[in-house]
């Protein structure tokens, strides 16, 4: 019983006599360091407009703020009287109280030390920051940290129709820099070897050139040309799998997108965003991984799944969390080798 991606009837394939892990086709020849490093450099050259993902859009309730640290800067995020996101420095301009612990009243932060009210219009010496809610994630613009030409809006990748999709957001953190997270995602060859519990039969069918100039120069077309294409099966049991085709692209320096182009869940995307928690050049850097899984399907049964999204989302987050326990170890190891920290040579 076999099936090629794109067949509309049976989303599953039964693998007959699957090879043992050690007998699968090695991928190290294709995973050339020059190809991965060149793709990373081209991604780093694309504009971000100084926008950083800070978490899931639904993390901020109406009457309580959320504290975050991005690039060493303490931030506070809350919802104004209209329910829109607002963001600003995390320290009260009066005596430095942590605003993440202050309640929200009538759309304004009320400092719990001395009662200073801080709204979206700001105060002298305390300016609010540009913030964006894309319906799945929230972004904040930090021009002092990014030092790029600011953009009015972040570079949000194309996504499936929200009315026909389910999304979940996983957040983790590791001791590395954003480039190490992005490099991990620009290495699709490691999937079936490093994550055999999730992926099998992985084959990279297309990769960008192994030079820093390459194709991508920042436009959507160039980004599409500067892509990694794969055929892979998601493992459900030891023999039952879901084969798909997918493409990995990096639309901006801290984002990698996996887009399922054929097979079950076609047009679904997985967005991986790497947000620095520590300032650039920190001796012990920390980076947050904020991964948005946005799933869609043309199958009638998916409508039922959407209505049960409250139960589906924890499962989606658990799957992402298991993968990132391994992938953060990959990113941390890459950072250690890059910087030679804590090594005797």
Image (spheres, grey):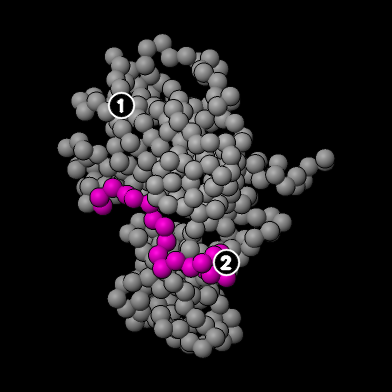
Residue, x 43% and y 46% (percent of image)? 222
Left or right: 143, with 227 as reference point: right
Q: In the drawing, does residue 84 fall left or right of residue 273?
A: left
Residue that appears at 44% across and 27% down: 205
Q: How many labels does the image show?
A: 2
Whether residue 75 is situated above or below residue 209 in the rendered picture:
below
Closest to the observer, 151 or 113: 151
Which residue has dot 1 on it? 5
The reply, left or right, for residue 99 in relation to residue 283 is left
Q: Percent x, y for residue 1?
A: 29, 14
Q: Is residue 202 above or below residue 164?
A: above
Q: Which residue is drawn at 45% across and 50% down?
A: 251
- Using a 10 Å C-alpha cutoff, classify the residue at mark 1 as few (fewer than 14 neighbours), some (14 to 19) or many (20 or more): many
- Kindly state the secondary structure of the residue where label 1 is placed: loop
From the top left corner, tell me how far across and down residue 334 is, in percent. 65, 41
Q: Nearer the viewer, residue 221 or 9?
A: 221
- x then y, percent, for residue 274: 52, 52
Q: In which quarter of the image is residue 119?
A: bottom left
Instruction: Answer whether residue 78 is visible to the viewer in this image.
Output: no
Q: Determine the image quadrant of residue 203.
A: top left
Question: For the view shown, which residue lies furthest in the top direction?
Answer: 17
**Residue assigned mark 2:** 147
Q: Which image quadrant is residue 288 in?
A: bottom right
Q: Does the magenta stretch include residue 261?
A: no
Residue 15 or 243: which is nearer the viewer? Answer: 243
Q: Give the range drawn in magenta.
A: 140-162
How far apart marks 1 and 2 lie (CA) works out to 43 Å
Image position, residue 298 (x, y; %): 21, 38
Magenta highlight: main SS:
loop
Q: Are marks 1 and 2 in contact (CB under 8 Å)?
A: no
**Name of the residue lying farthest toward the left:** 300
């Amino acid at each position: 019983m076999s099936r090629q991606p794109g067949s509309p009837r049976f989303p599953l394939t039964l693998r007959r006599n699957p090879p043992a892990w050690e007998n699968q086709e090695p991928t190290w020849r294709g995973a050339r360091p020059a190809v991965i490093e060149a793709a990373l450099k081209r991604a780093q050259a694309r504009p971000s407009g100084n926008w950083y993902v800070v978490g899931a859009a639904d993390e901020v309730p109406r009457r309580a703020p959320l504290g975050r640290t991005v690039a060493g800067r303490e931030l506070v995020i809350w919802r104004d009287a209209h329910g829109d996101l607002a963001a600003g420095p995390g320290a009260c301009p009066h005596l430095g109280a942590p605003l993440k612990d202050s309640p929200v009243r009538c759309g304004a932060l009320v400092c719990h030390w001395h009662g200073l009210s801080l709204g979206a219009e700001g105060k002298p010496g305390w300016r609010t920051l540009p913030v964006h809610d894309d319906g799945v994630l929230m972004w904040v613009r930090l021009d002092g940290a990014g030092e790029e030409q600011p953009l009015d809006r972040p570079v949000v990748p194309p996504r499936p129709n929200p009315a026909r999709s389910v999304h979940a957001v996983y957040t983790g953190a590791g001791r590395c820099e954003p480039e190490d997270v992005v490099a991990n995602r620009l290495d699709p060859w490691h999937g079936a070897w490093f994550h055999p519990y999730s992926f099998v039969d992985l084959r990279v069918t297309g990769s960008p050139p192994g030079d820093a100039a390459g194709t991508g120069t920042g436009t959507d077309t160039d980004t599409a040309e500067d892509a990694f294409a794969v055929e892979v099966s998601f493992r459900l049991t030891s023999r039952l799998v879901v084969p798909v085709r997918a493409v990995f692209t990096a639309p901006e320096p801290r984002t990698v997108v996996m887009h399922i182009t054929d097979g079950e869940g076609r047009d679904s995307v997985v967005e991986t965003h790497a947000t620095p928690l520590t300032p650039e050049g920190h001796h012990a850097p920390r980076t947050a991984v904020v991964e948005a899984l946005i799933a869609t399907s043309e199958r009638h049964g998916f409508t039922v799944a959407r209505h049960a999204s409250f139960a589906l989302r924890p499962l989606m987050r658990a799957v992402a969390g298991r993968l990132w326990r391994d992938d953060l170890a990959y990113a941390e190891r890459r950072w250690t080798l890059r910087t030679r920290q804590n090594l005797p040579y």
